Structures are given as C-alpha cells and as structure tokens.
Amino acid sequence: MSQPDASSHASREPNRLAAETSPYLLQHAYNPVDWRPWGDEAFEEARRLDRPVFLSVGYSACHWCHVMERESFEDEAIAELLNSRFVSIKVDREERPDVDQIYMTAVQALTQRGGWPMSVFLTPDRQPFFGGTYWPPRARMGMQGFHEILQAIDDAWQNRRQDVRTSAASLTEAVARMSAMEFDPAELSVDLLRNAMRALLRTFDARYGGFGGAPKFPHPMDLRVLLRCWKRFGDADALDAARLTLDRMVAGGIYDHLGGGFHRYSTDARWLVPHFEKMLYDNALLVPAYLELWQIERRPDDARVVRETLDYVLREMTSPEGPFFSTQDADSEGEEGRFFVWSVEEIESLLETDDARVFCYAYDVAPGGNWEGASILNRPKPSDQAAAVLGMSADELDRRLSAARAVLFEARGKRVAPGRDDKVLVSWNGLMIAAMARAGAVLGEPRYAAAAARAADCLLANVRDEQGRLLHSWKDGRARFRGYLDDSACLIDGLVELQQATSDARWIDAALELADRMIRDFAADDGGFFYTAGDHEALIARTRDVQDNATPSGAAMAAFALLRLGRLASRTDLEERGYRTLQAVSGLMAEHPRAAGQSLLALDFHLGPSPEVVLAEPTSGAADPLVAEVRQRFLPGALLLRTVSGEPVPEWMAPLVANRRPVSGAATAYVCERGLCREPCTDPAALGRLLDS
C-alpha cells in the first residue's frame, strides 16, 4: 500500500509505528495519536501510568479503517484525549491474527457483531472490557461518537474502576470459553457430507447464486463441497448451485472484467457492487473452484477465468523475489472503487462509436450509471443473448469485446492505482502456491507451476528463524512474527500441490519437515491443534482455529494437508493425526456445516475414493499422455506419482512405487487404493475408462 506523504505532516514527528514493516501501521505513523505497536512495552507503560489501553485493529484494504483514520485519528481533539488518558496500540490483523481472533471474540460477545476497524478497550493486563467496530468522531444518526465514548471510558476508569475490572474478568472468561468451543463428536461418515449439502442448498439463492442475501461472500470451500457431493451422491442440484454461483460471480461486478481477479465480496444480492479491495486469499481459493468446474464440464470460460485471475496475480501481486503480496486497496484518490468504474463518455472517448455502443450494452454502462453515478462493469446477459440483441454472432461479439477490453485496460492503467499492501504472508502464499500449482497441472500451463515454485523456494529460504521454524510475515527483507498453525498447514498443502504438478520430490521432503514441526509445536492432546505454538507469546487465551471464515481454518487445513501428505509418503502417523483432527471437529461439521467447508473437503478425501496413480516411465516424459487423462478429470481424491526407469526413488515414495515398472517398454499406469490395485494399463483411453469407473 502506498505510504502517506511525510511532507503533508511536516509539522509532526512520526510516532512509534514508523519503525514497523506493515504498510497499514506505517499509514498511521504520522497520525497525531501516539500509537504504539503491540508488545510488552505498551502494556508496561499503561501499568506505569495507570491508564486503560485503546486497541485499534484493522488492515490496509479496509475501507472503513481509512474512514476512521481520516475522521478520528487525524482529529487533534480526539488525539489529545487518547494521548492524555489512554495508551493506544495499533495492530495489523494480517500480521497478528492471534491478537485479532481473541479480541474479535470479545467484541462479538459484547455486541453480537464484528468487523473492522475493531476498537477495544483493555486493562493494562490485556483484559478487554468494552469494544465495538467503527465509530464516527462524534454522535450522529443514532450512533455513539468516538469522542464521547473516550470520555465515558475515562470516567468509568477513574470513578468506577471495580466495575471495569469485574466486566473485564467476566469478558475474559467468556473469550476463553468461546475460544475453546466444543461440540458433541459425530461419526466421520458420508452422512456429514449429505447433511452439509442439504444445509447449503437450503440457504442457496436460486436466482442469483450464492448463499443467503446481501452482503454476499464467495464461499469457495462450500462450492467445492457441493461439487464433491454432486460426484458422490449424483445430486444435480448440488452441481447446479455451484455452477450458477460461479457463473453469476464472474458475470457480476465482483469480478474485474478488465484486469482479472475477484474483489472481496458483494454488497448486494446479485454480485453487482463489490467492496473493491482484492485479497490474495479470495483469488487463491476461487481458482480451484473454477478449475474443478472446468474438469467437470470443460467449458472454456471457466479456464479463462482461472488464467485471467492468475495472470492478474502474476502481473500485480507478485514480488520480484517470487512470493505474492497480500492485498490491493478498495480506494484510490480517496474514493472507493474510483479506479474500476466507468462512464459512457469515457468509453466513447476511447473506442470507435459502434464499438462503444456494443461494449456499453454488453457491460451495462449507461448514462447515470449503475452505482453512485458511475458504471461498474458487469455482464447482465450471456454472450449469446447479448449478441442476438446486437445482431451479430457470439463469436464476433466476443472478438470485439476482447479488443475493447484491451483498450480500456491500457487506459485504466494511467489512472491513480489503488494502494497495495506488499507484505508477504506465509499462510496466504501457501493458498496461492496450491492454486498456481494446480492450475499449471490441470491447464497444462507450466508457467503457473514455475511461479508457485519460485514463491515456495523464497519462503523456505527466507521466512524461517534460526531453528528452521516458519515465521508469518516477510517484507523488505525482514521476516517477523512466529508462524501460526495456518502458516504451516497452508504451506504444507501448497508443497503437496507443487509435487503433484511437477513430480519434484524435494517439495515432499520440505512438507514432511514442516509437518513434523507443526505437530510438535501446535498439536493438542485431544488430536486437534492450537492456533499458536506452545512457546508463543502468552495471551489471555490460547485459541483453537476450527471454523472457516474468509480463509480455511487452521485445523481444517492441517487435517487436509496431513491426510494427503501421509498417504503420499506412506506415513500412517501423519494420516492418523489428520484423522484425529477431523474427529476433533466432527461435531462442528454436524452442527454448523457452513462453518466447516475445508473440514468437509478433508473428510471427502478421507472417505475416498482416493486412488493412487503410479506412472512408470521408461524415459522421462513418456507418460505425459497418461498424465493428461488423470489431470483433466474431476478426481478430487486422486494422488499422482511418476517414476522413471533407472532413476533413484526418494525414500518417502518407495512404498507406493515398489515393483511398479513399465510393461513391454511402454509407460504404464498402476491404479491402486488402500492396497487394492487394478490391472496395469498402457493405453491412455483405457486409463480414462478405468478412472471414470
């Protein structure tokens, strides 16, 4: 994200955030508020001064975080009150998800809602006693004003201290209880998947796709669950729901029709008006959903969406060293969405008259616009319908629109671009490494797998401490913060996908090392995982990350990664740990399946079919036609291994490939599952029929 111009604050000294690496924290470095980063020093100062702590948590792409900064944190009167009566701490939730989880739980317990910016008041011993989200600087439209809230909190601290401490103790106890949420265990059976499918279909919006009403989020894990339920149960409604949702999203304004990639979510039910920030994780999680739909139906548009999305990431979200940046802002020039919207006049100035007419009709650009006087590009009609109205073939329309998009994309590049948060987060990178690797394999695009490999190499070399433990964040050559459970789990999964895409054994070697350390550092006695390592900074609660939010839960990703890695490497101890983790969240899958999409994906893999396809090649590359038969099919549980005659076999691979040799000098496929093997075959068509059966 672009940093504030220091010249605009020439009369101010920077506060303590100036030494941070987070672009979000650096944005606040010249506020008149005496911000401090999270740490013991800030709480010791609060104890010394006998003051409460004001904790503000946000992230760089958060529109309302920017609003609250402009309205309140640049307000001299509010800053004076904060500086004289409180110790103020600013946290980037993307750097410190552990802190964010704990205090978001407190805010939700207090207000029954959550969001960012998150504003919480703490005692000097870190216990929360009051909180909320965005507050305007002064009371308006029935909302409390931040200035008045600060005065009330100060009054309570000075004159009703015991009430504050009682409230803090009670809320801290509630946070600990909610952080260790437990459910009655359920049997790990297909019934969990069937019940999840029914729950998703009950909330499915049959008109616009997605689940529930506005605001609408993509829910990529749930969509992938539906695709697996279609395959397992033959339920056409599950496939229809996933297809309609994916189609409506890519036709809507939530998709960037010029530059590729998806915005965060839609504020309306029909996917037209997004919050315009782009998050690395949304795009990483949506790519596999479109890839799987392509494997099922082979529609060119699904592959196009994958390529456009990943090309956007390579073009705008990839560091010179290889890893992927975190977010792009919603705002530019102080306005949300300004970079992305259009007027009829702008388009007519850039395109020939008839091309402008065609483009404006196809992309819903009209006088007065479709949002706040401007037009968000979207496709209300599919190409064949729009072409019929315009009096041309669908092919001609697509050709003309493609040429027009190129012109508009070039012109848009001359606008002031949204800010970019260029820190690298290991967990989100693991998700994108998996997406890039899988796309490279499925679409036959080695450049995507190569990008994934560059990112993984950089993370493994640079984002670890002296003991080899993963760290969480990397920026400007500095790796910081102890890694969290999802850092390890997501990167392990990405490394497994890299091996599947490239057949390079070193990725599994690295994944096995990370898996052993993850179990050692994060495992709980009941078979699940804590979100933080055993020697992590002591907070008021040690949380279990079991419910999916915008990203998969750490426990679910750990289960998924361990089950697949354990099967590939014939490590039954890893499979058993993955299974026990699923058992620990089985009640969540039963009671709240919409919060357990990634756990259900892991369960689907565990239940199978999950065939191991071993390809024995007389020479390198001889099995490529057989590989294509595997990769182009929707086989969510399949694992692929390749061996070449005369080449050494890694120790971890030996049990699965033992005695697998080319038959009659031809590349040969061996399809096995849990020790049961089919007849080897050398003909790609025969392999396809075998896999289909």
Image (tube, rainbow, N blue to C red):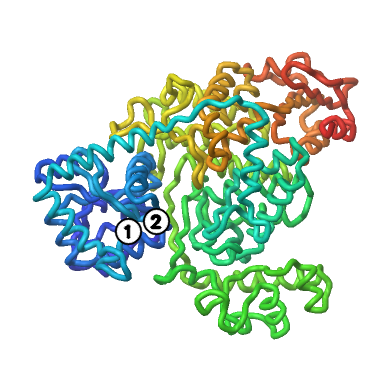
**Residue 671 coordinates in the image, percent (x, y):** 79, 24
Q: Amino acid at mark 1?
A: Gln
For residue 174, the mark is none
**Residue 39 coordinates in the image, percent (x, y):** 24, 40
- Mark 2 falls on what kind of element? loop
Q: Is residue 580 left or right of residue 208?
A: left
- Check if mark 2's residue and mark 1's residue have beta carbons within 8 Å: yes
Could you classify mark 1 by the number of other residues whose Cα lies within 10 Å: few (under 14), some (14-19), or many (20 or more)?
A: some
Mark 2 vs mark 1: in front: 2
Task: Kindly identify which residue carries mark 2.
Answer: 60
Residue at 66% in and 70% down: 405
Residue 281 visible to an observer of this rendering: yes
Q: Nearer the viewer, residue 311 or 255?
A: 255
Residue at 17% in and 57% down: 152
Residue 480 visible to an observer of this rendering: no
Quarter of the picture containing the C terminus is top right
Q: Amino acid at mark 2?
A: Ser
Inter-mark Cα distance, 2 to 1: 8 Å
Residue at 24% in and 40% down: 127
Quarter of the picture containing the N terminus is bottom left
Task: Kindly identify which residue carries mark 1.
Answer: 27
Q: Is residue 320 left or right of residue 667?
A: left
Q: Is residue 648 above or below residue 148?
A: above
- Mark 1 falls on what kind of element? helix
**Residue 438 coordinates in the image, percent (x, y):** 66, 41
Q: Is residue 106 above or below residue 377?
A: above
